[in-house]
Image (cartoon, coloured by chain):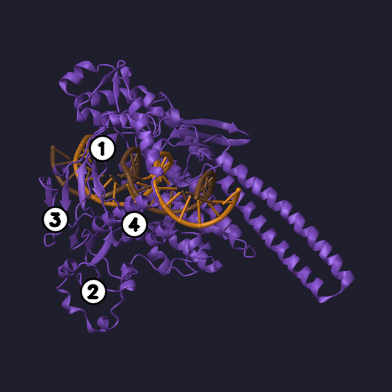
Chain colours: A purple, B orange, C brown
DNA sequence: ACCCAGACTTAGGAGGTGGAAT
DNA sequence: ATTCCACCTCCTAAGTCTGGGT
């Protein structure tokens, strides 16, 4: 994908050198006060009494606490961040859940929906038909025309056919799925046209499912599960140029499922007539359910929601590690600059790679198995073909031009002036190499991370991304927030700071399909508003003139109300213009990923408090749930 | 030193939803 | 009431990193 053009803003963070600029964090990684007290500190409310029994041994709640026994609502806002953490390695003491929800069984097509082979109607066996419907549903997608997709699909489809089908259906191009495809289109159209009641019914059914399977009990607290539904079967579509696209993702059965829960919990029952693959009781891991997927052979998990204690604690910890990096980043930078001069090739490569990771927020770049996944790279796996060296370019010296596909096959394109020593090192690394050779042939992520571990406990390559993202947000907010601005303008500043981070981290998106159109609509709204403003101003003027002549109360009042009207329209216009700017600047940039994964939420919370911005303007409901810990603890003077 | 399985975080897109505009 | 559109939720792929085995 070539979403990213040459004219993009440079993706280099620009951070003040002054280390004393930010006061050192008041709290370090041990901010926890209250002891956890073995599972029975806080009572949890569960609607069903069964679950209450689970914790019937909760008798020793201290008196002091009983008095303040929180009401239901408060209880749902359990402040896990005020409790002590478990010792390293232990993730929970009690875990009970209902197991996964399986994909609905296949419903065969109605008799009148036909599949044609070589122009003739052909009735498929149920299994073959099911797989055929997967293809039929994708017919409008470009990738069903791709050779790899078709080849992989056909190979896997044939495995599901009866021997007769196999001998008849020998060429995919003779298969006609169009009737099936039309049927599905009609179905989805019908779904859209459903009556309110029918839609309501579906909604209620989903809610029932969520209520029953969407939560678990972990250590006396009811916690939301992130993904309690098993992935349905279908055709695999990897991102980018994936060698396995089109392969059949098989249906997961209870017999594939490993259940993880505590011994003394009510063990979830497999569907009637089925058995689990295994039930285990491993409290050193956080997952509730796992299975092995058939495309890559990797393990998939059911885990908790980001709002859960177990995810929140980890997230918090991540930002604390990044803050520790802040304290020693100067030292580390000096160190790698020294290492550029090392006589050991390995050390030089490590130092240059680390410089890229730090300066450009590149990912570590683990090696990948060839032919198993799309060809993408990160820092350590960069190849000679991914960079170009320009001793001079557009008036700048020592420019490195990066052009490679990163995670999710998102293109990274950037021209970066680097220090002479880096440039010379890169020339050295590239000597006598082919384009497809590794740039850093003496380096991998394991070597790099081992080194980082020596520099600071818990330091890995990705900590630099977190650190640089968060420090950039903080610094950009400082720079861009104008105290005199109104709230929408301040929010625009926030979004711009957020955008600076997204650009640094190369978080891109495809421009929304309706972008041009919606931009035009907005522009015409702005034009209309401008006219309205001009009208209002004219009216004000004449009202003023009128008042000057008449000099009575009534006409004075008219002037006042006209004035107000002008002001109101000015404000509306400004809001629209801000919206247009924001949207335009956001065309290809995805803000969500950095907001959710890289920016210490306490920075945003503090900023909101400082400027009186309602937190709802920055974080939606889900995000507020995820960042409840930060919203609760960060004050306006918080420094990352 | 390497390899691999396992666990967990990070990622963009599809499609649904609900409120505003017409 | 209907349409539109922005936002949100869900989905699951694709990374990172660890640790155990050899």
Horizontal and vertical percent for residue A87? Answer: 22, 63
Query: Disc 3 to disc 4, how far (Cα)?
Result: 22 Å
Q: Do the residues under discs 1 and 4 have CB atoms within 8 angstroms? A: no
Q: Residues within 10 Å of mark 2 (few under 14, many from 20)?
A: some
**Residue A563, located in which quarter of the rendered image?**
bottom right
Numbered badge on residue A41 = 2
The numbered mark 2 sits on a residue in which chain?
A: A
The numbered mark 3 sits on a residue in which chain?
A: A
Do callouts 2 and 4 point to residues on the same chain?
yes
Left or right, A140 with reference to A391: left
Residue at image position (58%, 56%) is A493
Left or right, A74 with reference to A435: left
Q: Earlier in the sequence, mark 1 or mark 2?
A: 2
Q: Secondary structure at mark 2?
A: loop
Q: Which residue is mark 1?
A: A233
Q: Secondary structure at mark 3?
A: loop
Residue at image position (51%, 60%) is A617
Q: Earlier in the sequence, mark 1 or mark 3?
A: 1
Left or right, A41 with reference to A353: left
Numbered badge on residue A306 = 4
Horizontal and vertical percent for residue A489? Answer: 61, 58
Numbered badge on residue A281 = 3
**Residue A346, located in which quarter of the rendered image?**
top left
């Amino acid at each position: 994908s070539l979403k990213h053009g040459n004219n993009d803003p440079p993706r280099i963070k620009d951070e003040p050198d002054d280390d004393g600029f930010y006061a050192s964090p008041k709290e370090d990684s041990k901010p926890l006060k209250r002891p956890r007290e073995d599972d029975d500190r806080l009572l949890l409310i569960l609607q069903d009494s069964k679950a209450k029994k689970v914790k019937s041994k909760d008798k020793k709640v201290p008196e002091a606490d009983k008095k303040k026994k929180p009401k239901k609502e408060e209880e749902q806002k359990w402040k896990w961040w005020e409790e002590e953490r478990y010792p390293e390695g232990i993730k929970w003491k009690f875990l009970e859940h209902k197991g996964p929800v399986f994909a609905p069984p296949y419903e065969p097509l109605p008799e009148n929906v036909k599949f044609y082979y070589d122009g003739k109607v052909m009735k498929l066996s149920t299994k073959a038909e099911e797989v055929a419907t997967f293809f039929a549903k994708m017919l409008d997608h470009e990738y069903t025309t791709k050779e790899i997709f078709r080849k992989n699909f056909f190979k896997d489809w044939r495995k599901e056919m009866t021997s007769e089908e196999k001998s008849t259906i020998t060429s995919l191009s003779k298969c006609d799925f169009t009737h099936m495809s039309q049927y599905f289109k009609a179905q989805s159209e019908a779904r859209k046209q459903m009556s309110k009641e029918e839609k309501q019914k579906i909604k209620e059914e989903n809610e029932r499912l969520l209520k029953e399977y969407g939560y678990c009990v972990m250590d006396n607290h009811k916690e939301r599960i992130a993904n309690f539904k098993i992935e349905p079967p279908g055709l695999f579509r990897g991102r980018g140029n994936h060698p396995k696209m089109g392969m059949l993702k098989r249906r997961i059965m209870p017999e594939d499922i490993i259940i993880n829960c505590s011994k003394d919990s009510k063990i979830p029952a497999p569907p009637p007539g089925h058995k689990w693959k295994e039930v285990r009781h491993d409290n050193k891991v956080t997952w509730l359910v796992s299975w092995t997927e058939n495309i890559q052979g990797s393990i998939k998990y059911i885990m908790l929601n980001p709002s859960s204690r177990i995810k929140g604690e980890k997230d918090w910890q991540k930002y604390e590690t990044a803050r520790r990096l802040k304290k020693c980043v100067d030292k580390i930078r000096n160190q790698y600059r020294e290492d550029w001069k090392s006589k050991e090739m390995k050390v030089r490569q490590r130092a240059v790679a680390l410089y890229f990771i730090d300066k450009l927020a590149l990912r570590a770049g683990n090696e990948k198995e060839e032919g198993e996944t799309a060809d993408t790279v990160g820092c350590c796996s960069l190849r000679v073909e991914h960079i170009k060296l320009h001793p001079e370019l557009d008036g700048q010296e020592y420019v490195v031009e990066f052009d490679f596909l990163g995670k999710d096959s998102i293109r990274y394109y950037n021209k970066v002036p680097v220090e002479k020593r880096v440039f010379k090192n890169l020339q050295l690394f590239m000597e006598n190499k082919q384009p497809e050779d590794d740039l850093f042939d003496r380096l991998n992520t394991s070597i790099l991370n081992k080194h980082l571990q020596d520099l600071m406990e818990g330091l890995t390559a990705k900590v630099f991304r977190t650190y640089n993202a968060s420090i950039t947000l903080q610094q950009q907010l400082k720079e861009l927030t104008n105290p005199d601005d109104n709230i929408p303008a301040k929010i625009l500043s926030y979004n711009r700071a957020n955008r600076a981070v997204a650009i640094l981290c190369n978080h891109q998106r495809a421009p929304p399909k309706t972008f041009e159109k919606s931009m035009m609509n907005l522009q015409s709204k702005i034009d209309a508003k401008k006219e309205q403003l001009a009208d209002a101003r004219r009216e004000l003027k004449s009202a003023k003139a009128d008042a000057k002549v008449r000099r009575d109360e009534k006409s004075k009042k008219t002037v006042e109300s006209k004035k107000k009207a002008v002001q109101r329209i000015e404000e509306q216009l400004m809001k629209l213009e801000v919206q247009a700017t924001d949207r335009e600047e956001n065309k290809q940039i995805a803000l969500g990923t950095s907001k959710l994964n890289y920016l210490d939420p306490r920075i945003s919370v503090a900023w909101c408090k400082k400027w009186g911005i309602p937190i709802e303007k920055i974080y939606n409901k889900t995000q507020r749930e995820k960042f409840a810990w930060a919203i609760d603890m960060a004050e306006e003077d918080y420094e990352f």
